[in-house]
Image (cartoon, helix red, strand yellow):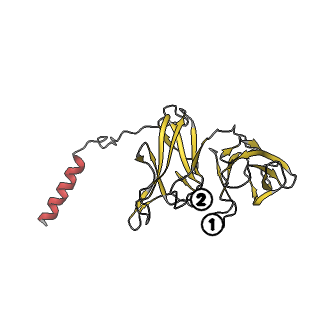
């Protein structure tokens, strides 16, 4: 009984030693506002067919990935995004920065190998997506290219839908059009490989439509090259054409994300 009483006294003493208001959080935080000019904002999308699992490094410091107790260091493979929450970007120092991508240390082959070095230049308060592109193979062990896209925010309008096209389809036509299949209207024209269009407003917002992707200037579709969907009013969508022409492992594919809204 004596031991229990001593324990009770110790607990009471611990709680009464601090006056009301003394238990405060002392960790300093920095609140980052939207478009804060002290930063640029960056995210990554891996669109390199054949890519191993990688992590991203900013000026030689790793800033992606996690650790799994069973499999070790985790990373990002083909057709993945980091950060993986919608609309989330990493604040970085504006100006010149070096980006590397390295194979995860838990890989069976080539662990820790640097497969991409990209020198980027970003402006204060601006948002960017860095796409890894090209094709990865086990002989070269390099990503052959990357593409930095500024994320320009369209003016919000809850009665309209905006779309943009990023052409990262390796080995496909030199340029691609996005059309509305039912009318044949060209919505976005002549988007070359490793480039992007501006945002455009589409007709019939909020209705089910089929969008087709054609060899630029012709009605010849990029097989299978079409998307049947209903796009939500008040949103701005980025469509990404990806894959390798003629490949059965990473054939033509289409990804999308909403920008900001």
Of 244 and 211, nearer the camera is 244
- How far from the left and from the top, in percent, is residue 126? 57, 36
Left or right of 199 in this view: 103: left
Q: As displayed, is residue 219 above or below residue 234?
A: below
Q: Position of residue 226 (x, y in %)?
A: 76, 58
Gap in angstroms between the C-alphas marked 1 and 2? 9 Å
- Name of the residue lying farthest toward the left: 2
Label 2 near label 1: C-beta < 8 Å?
yes
For the question of whether residue 17 can be seen, the reply is yes
Query: Is 87 drawn above or below residue 224 in the view shown?
Result: above
From the image, tell me which residue sits under label 1: 249
Q: Residues within 10 Å of mark 2 (few under 14, many from 20)?
A: many
- Mark 2 highlights which residue? 49
Picture residue at 14% right of the left edge, 59% below the top: 6
Query: Which of the pair 153/168 is nearer the observer?
Result: 168
Kindly state the secondary structure of the residue where label 1 is placed.
loop
Q: Which residue corresponds to the image point at 52% horizontal and 54% vertical from the top-left?
A: 142
Residue 163 visible, this orientation: no
Q: In the picture, residue 128 is in which quadrant? A: top right
Residue at image point 13% right, 67% down: 1
> Who comes first in sequence, dot 1 or dot 2?
2
């Amino acid at each position: 009984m004596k031991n229990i009483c001593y324990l009770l006294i110790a607990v009471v003493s611990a709680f009464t030693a601090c006056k009301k208001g003394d238990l405060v959080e002392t960790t300093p935080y920095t609140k980052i506002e939207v478009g804060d000019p002290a930063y640029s904002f960056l995210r990554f999308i891996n669109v390199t067919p054949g890519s191993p699992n990688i992590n991203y490094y900013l000026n030689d410091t790793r800033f992606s990935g996690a650790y799994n107790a069973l499999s070790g260091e985790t990373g990002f493979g083909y057709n993945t995004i980091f950060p993986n929450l919608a609309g989330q970007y990493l604040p970085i120092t504006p100006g010149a920065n070096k980006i590397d991508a390295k194979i995860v240390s838990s890989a069976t082959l080539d662990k820790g190998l640097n497969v991409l070095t990209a020198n980027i230049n970003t402006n204060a308060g601006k948002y960017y997506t860095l796409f890894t592109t090209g094709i990865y193979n086990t002989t070269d062990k390099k990503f052959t290219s990357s593409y930095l896209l500024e994320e320009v925010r369209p003016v919000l309008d809850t009665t309209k839908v905006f779309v943009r096209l990023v052409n990262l389809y390796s080995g496909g036509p030199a340029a691609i059009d996005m059309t509305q299949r039912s009318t044949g209207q060209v919505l976005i024209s002549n988007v070359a490989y490793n480039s992007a269009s501006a945002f455009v407003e589409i007709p019939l917002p909020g209705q089910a439509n089929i969008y087709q992707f054609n060899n630029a200037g012709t009605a010849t579709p990029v097989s299978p090259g079409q998307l049947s969907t209903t796009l939500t009013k008040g949103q701005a969508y980025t469509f990404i054409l990806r894959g390798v022409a003629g490949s059965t492992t990473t054939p033509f594919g289409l990804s999308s994300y909403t920008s900001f809204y």
